[in-house]
Image (spheres, helix red, strand yellow):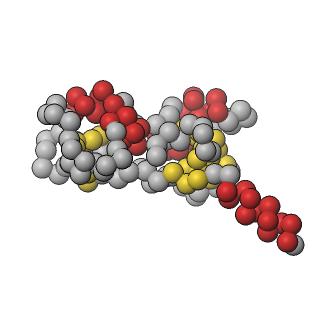
Amino acid sequence: MRFNTNLLLASFLGVATAFRRGCRPDLTSQVSGTGYYTMTDKDTWDVVAADFCTTGPELQKLNPDPAPASQGIIRVPCRVRKRDCARVPGQDNGYYRAVEGDDLTLIATDFCMTVYFLQFLNPGVENSEKVTPGTIYKVSCTFN
């Protein structure tokens, strides 16, 4: 019993949950799909961009004014992404455990991937949209 407990604890230390930055949707603009994010001292264009499935240069195009100081509010592509991954330290990939109602498109989109790339990272995953709850998928986990 002690061995199993220690093994379980060690497995949790090998990955870190990557929590994605959130955004506040812009409900006043006629441009849908954008919102706002408040920068912190540790944020960079590229790091923030990864959370919103874009690139640093694209994010800067959305914010043509001079670079915001820390705690500045910037415009970002904004859509609800409910899935987070358990990131493998030192890698851009992590793991996601499927839940009821998931399908390959929803999983891939939340991790800024195509279904094709999700299947590439997970050999043996069929072209079917169906996923079995509890299945663990390797996913792109560049954010955070």
Please report the residue visible at 47 percent of the width from the left and 53 percent of the height from the top.
19
User: Residue 98, image x and y in percent?
Assistant: 61, 52
Q: Is residue 32 above or below residue 55?
A: below
Q: Quadrant of the N terminus?
A: bottom right
Please report the residue visible at 50 percent of the width from the left and 34 percent of the height from the top.
113
Image quadrant assignment for residue 139:
top right
Residue 69 appears in the picture as rendered? yes
User: Residue 112, image x and y in percent?
Assistant: 46, 37
Please report the residue visible at 35 percent of the width from the left and 53 percent of the height from the top.
22
Is residue 83 toward the left or the right of residue 97 in the image? Answer: left
Please report the residue visible at 79 percent of the width from the left and 68 percent of the height from the top.
5
Residue 131 appears in the picture as rendered? no
Q: Nearer the viewer, residue 69 or 17?
A: 69
Q: Nearer the viewer, residue 17 or 35?
A: 17
Q: Is residue 1 above or below residue 58?
A: below
Q: Nearer the viewer, residue 15 or 94?
A: 15
Is residue 9 toward the left or the right of residue 112 in the image? Answer: right
Is residue 75 toward the left or the right of residue 106 in the image? Answer: left
User: Residue 17, image x and y in percent?
Assistant: 55, 54
Is residue 112 toward the left or the right of residue 140 in the image? Answer: left
User: Residue 41, image x and y in percent?
Assistant: 31, 49
Number of marks in the rendered image = 0
Farthest residue in the bottom direction? 1
Image quadrant assignment for residue 89:
top right
